[in-house]
Amino acid sequence: MRIGLVAAPWIPIPPIGYGGIERVVDSLARGFVAAGHEVLLAASSDSTCPVPLVPNMRPSEPAELGFTLSELSHVIRAYEGLADVDIIHDHTLAGPLCTARRGAPPVVTTIHGPLIPASADLYRAMAADTAIIGISRDQTSRVPDVPVTRVIHHGMDVAAVPVGSGKGGYVCFVGRMCPDKGVLEAIHIARAADIPLRIAAKMREPDEIEYFRSAIEPLLGANEEFLGELADADKYRLMGEAVAFLNPIQWSEPFGLVMIESLSTGTPVVGTLIGSAPEIVDHGKTGYLGQTEELHRFLPLAASLDRAHCRDRALKQFSTEKMIANHLDLYAKLLEKSQLPGVPDGSHLHQNRVRGTVIRTPEPSPITTRRP
């Protein structure tokens, strides 16, 4: 297949530092090529992912993060450069809605964020001519009338992550400096367990800096060490030597890639029982999940968990290879169905109003159905 990938304009592919979605796009691009397919990537011009890039794209615009005008201009250029591919996988929000697609290839998009009322309206609208991928069953269950074609968990190159010893005598927090990620809770949990905490956090945006200065920095004491934002090698070293990765998130996160990173190093996860966490962490085997106020009791227990089992869980369930295979299977089915002049009644269908064809979306398998 000739596969076109569209990334957002704000961060290069792969990201230099923080950037979970960008890491996923990078893994998809490399994985598709490794599987023998052609890839054309529409991303910022300073991207270093080793696949052909759509020409005439602008450099990354981190200062414009989240701005609609920046994204719209980017996706218009992207679709113009992807006219000759077989299928487009668009990882932006605006692309599947705004771009003129007469005669264009079939389009797939991934819901990377939470399904809140505003975003649900957008996905309902784009579902008429776009196949939609969810990233967790928890995410898609929150707005069940959004027609999700399949749930595919994120994956990563687990084999490239070094395994740690877990003998550092500390727990770690890795995330973004904001209330939702639970860094404040992590400080109190580690203190209650009397275990040192090392904090690595992305802190670039004004609101992140303000939260650190007002809520976190005044609280830091002898039990905490703040490391700032780390490059991958340093991050994996931090995780790998930790007794546990502390993930007391305070919102229903659609998917926590950082938990997979921790398991890849062999380090169990201790976190809140919320969002996608139960789909990633096997309670009592690869970590512990519970309410915020009880997590301090789990930290000492995490040291006795089998680190090899944590690594094995990541390899078998959340590898790049599995993510790639699931995406390619979906692409192939969509391309096959898009060539049919019609399909029997009784199937789960959506009408491609631009191309004039009918796509039969496969009925969800037990793996991909939404959680009741």
Image (spheres, rainbow, N blue to C red):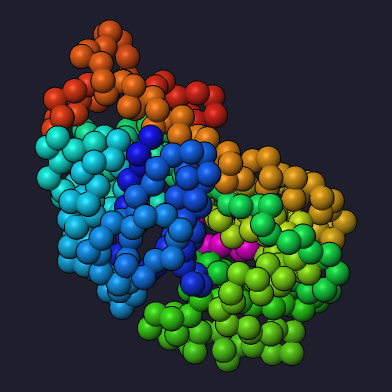
Q: Which residue lies furthest to the top in this view?
A: 344
Quadrant in which the N terminus appears: top left
Q: What stretch is highlighted in magenta?
A: 247-254
Q: Name the side, left or right, on which 137 lies relative to 44.
A: right
Q: Is residue 288 visible?
A: no
Using the image, determine if residue 250 lies above or below residue 216: above
Q: At 55% across and 69% down in the image, what residue appears?
A: 175
Q: Is residue 250 magenta?
A: yes
Using the image, determine if residue 33 lies above or below residue 356: below
Q: Name the side, left or right, on which 178 lies relative to 157.
A: left
Q: In which quarter of the image is residue 232?
A: bottom right
Q: Is residue 46 magenta?
A: no
Q: At 39% across and 24% down in the image, what residue appears?
A: 333
Q: Where is residue 69 in the image (x, y as percent from the top left)?
A: 17, 66
Along the line of sight, which residue is nearer the eye, 312 or 117? Answer: 312
Q: At 42% across and 54% down in the image, what residue appears?
A: 51
How many marks the image carries: the answer is: 0
Along the line of sight, which residue is nearer the eye, 78 or 371? Answer: 78
Q: Where is residue 244 in the image (x, y as percent from the top left)?
A: 75, 64
Q: Can residue 99 be seen in this view?
A: yes
Q: Which SS does the magenta portion mostly show?
A: loop
Q: At 47% across and 45% down in the image, what residue appears?
A: 33
Q: Position of residue 289 (x, y in %)?
A: 68, 53
Q: Position of residue 325 (x, y in %)?
A: 52, 35
